Amino acid sequence: RDYADAFAPVPRSTAGRIIMSLSAANQLHLHTMDVTKAFIQASWADLPENIGTIYITPPAGFDEEPGTVYEVVKPLYGIPASARALHFTLAKWFKTQGFRQHGFEESIWIRDADNKHAETLIVSAHIDDMLIACKSLTEMSEFKS
């Protein structure tokens, strides 16, 4: 398997428009968020497949012996498989927080109102950027922290 053949599920452009429409129709607050240091929080172990070991050459300016390579132990921005690893790391976290995946959109997450949460929260995750909709600013702030 070529590590460059990595696919990270992202929501369709219509999904964002639907969330915005739902927000307007139901008077939901709508926020965007960038996950800080997202790629280094991801893990290769969360991938459902084994991509093998990835090596990179040192960046220009590093004083290394010719032929030196580094093993990539954490997903890094710019490595195609990193976005896929981040998706699965986020999926694992969302499930532990009581979210469920939307039926046909793997990157749309919904946490229904229950005895712990007064309002439904909808999250559209596009790699490390999120669109969040919720009626309660308090619950949205808790999610974002």
Image: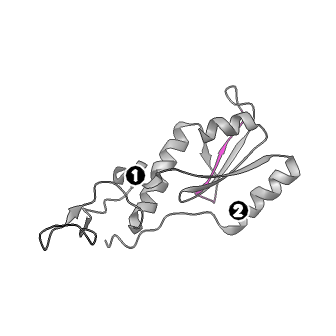
Q: Are marks 2 and 1 in contact (CB under 8 Å)?
A: no
Residue farthest to the left, as pictured: 65
Horizontal and vertical percent position of residue 130: 62, 54
Horizontal and vertical percent position of residue 125: 59, 55
Amino acid type assigned to the residue bearing label 1 in the image: Ile
Mark number for residue 15? 2
Horizontal and vertical percent position of residue 118: 74, 31
Secondary structure at badge 2 equals helix
Q: Main secondary structure of the magenta part?
A: loop
Q: Which residue is drawn at the image coordinates 23% and 70% (left, top)?
A: 57
| Residue nearest the viewer, comparing 87 with 136 | 136
Q: Which residue is drawn at the image coordinates 51% and 50% (left, top)?
A: 36
Identify the residue under disc 1. Answer: 40
Q: Which stretch did the figure color magenta?
A: 104-113
Sequence-wise, the earlier of marks 2 and 1 is 2
Secondary structure at badge 1 equals helix
Screen quadrant of the C terminus: top right
Q: Tell me: residue 51, above or below residue 103.
A: below
Screen quadrant of the N terminus: bottom left
**Does residue 9 appear to the left or right of 65 in the view shown?**
right
| Residue nearest the viewer, comparing 130 with 45 | 130
Q: Is residue 107 magenta?
A: yes
Q: Cα distance, mark 2 to mark 1? A: 27 Å
Residue 138 occupies which quadrant of the picture?
top right
Horizontal and vertical percent position of residue 32: 67, 53
